[in-house]
Image (cartoon, rainbow, N blue to C red):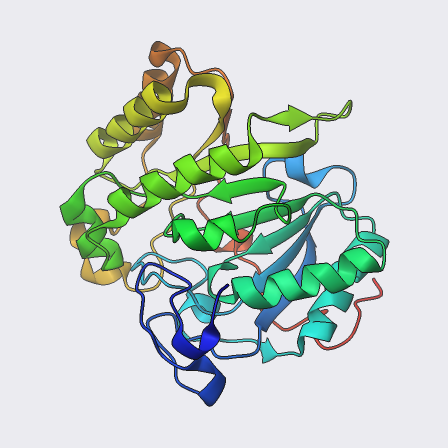
Amino acid sequence: MLDLGICTVCPWQCGVNRLAGETGACGAGALPKVALVSLHQWEEPCFVGEHGAGTVFFSYCNLHCVFCQNHEISQAGVGEEILIARLAEIFLEQQNRGAQSLDLVSPTQYVPQIIEALDIAKASGLCLPVVYNSNGYENVQTLESLAGYVDVFLPDLKYKDIAAAQKYSQAADYFSVASKAIKKMVELVGPPAFDAQGMMKRGVLVRHLIIPGQMKDSKALLDWLWNTFGDRIYLSLMNQFTPLYEVHAYKEINRKLTTYEYDQVVDHALNLGIKQCFIQEGKTSSVDFVPVFNGRGVLTADTE
């Protein structure tokens, strides 16, 4: 049982009493805080469908990535605190709006509240595939509590290199933690499963954002993923690195990814034999792809 009174929900194991207003490394409190509810068209095609993925963007994060595109909500905590009953309503509203999936973005710090809200929503007819869209920095024990609640795990895998993980996300143990977490995710939901329309209904899809100058690390991650899981997972290689937030202080990554860098990583995946992989084409490095976190759909239903 996860206890917010002595919070150990994430790998930081802060032990703070969130029920009494204390906050730890993530910044989250006792109530779920949400910044945006939307039908999102920019996720992988297997989550979007005709109307879009039913995204719920949660505020705060247990990592502090210097390049975070969503820093308004992950670091500054922009959003609205809501009751768990309202969160359950949001889940059902996304289904009623025609969402293809219920896409929980940055959910880690609110797992106990999300479980309670899912119980309420499922009792009222929620049947969308639940997608757990996280940074990969997860407690295995917390993931185990999600058995039967999450259909698809959508984790990042950011770094294998310890120095890069510490420098850019203040988490030197990132790969050690995330690798164990992804193994647990695969154990919990099994191999990928799709419906007749190509929508992912179950399984694990690992995202990797390629960082400028980090081709070697990206290739090392692909080696590990292929050697560990083979075709038991899907991958998504992302070229959308956009120099925002605090990147200006890190000259070596204060630029967009080059086509050469991205192609080198994609070619490495192909050479390994990886086929179950989404790639990005065109110019995806733009602030145009960053959502506007204006609280839409959070306190009241979005009718559009």
Q: Is residue 4 left or right of residue 209?
A: right
Residue at 56% across, 49% down = 132
Going by the picture, which residue comes out furthest to the left? 163
Q: Residue 31 in the image: state x and y as whole percent.
A: 57, 78
Q: Is residue 263 above or below residue 66?
A: above
Check the image and name the residue furthest to the front: 1
| Residue shown at the point (34%, 13%) measured from the top left | 272
Q: Give above or below for 207 relative to 92.
A: above
Task: Please tell me which residue lies in front, 32 or 207.
Answer: 32
Number of numbered tags placed on the structure image: 0
Residue 4 in sight in this render? yes
In the image, taking residue 7 as reference, residue 304 lies left or right, namely: right
Give the left or right position of residue 119, taking residue 97 as reference.
Answer: left
Q: Is residue 260 visible?
A: no
Up/down of 234 relative to 145, above or below? above
**Which residue occupies 78% across, 44% down?**
51
Residue 252 placement (x, y as % from top left): 17, 48
Where does residue 174 sit, x and y in percent of width and height? Answer: 27, 49
User: What is the quadrant of residue 246 in the picture?
Assistant: bottom left
Q: In front here: 220 or 22?
A: 22
Q: Residue 14: name its quadrant.
A: bottom left
Q: In the rendered image of this protein, does residue 91 appear above or below residue 23?
A: above
Percent x, y of residue 112: 55, 65
Left or right: 264 as drawn, with respect to 34: left
* Quadrant showing the C terminus: bottom right
Residue 209: which quarter of the image? top left
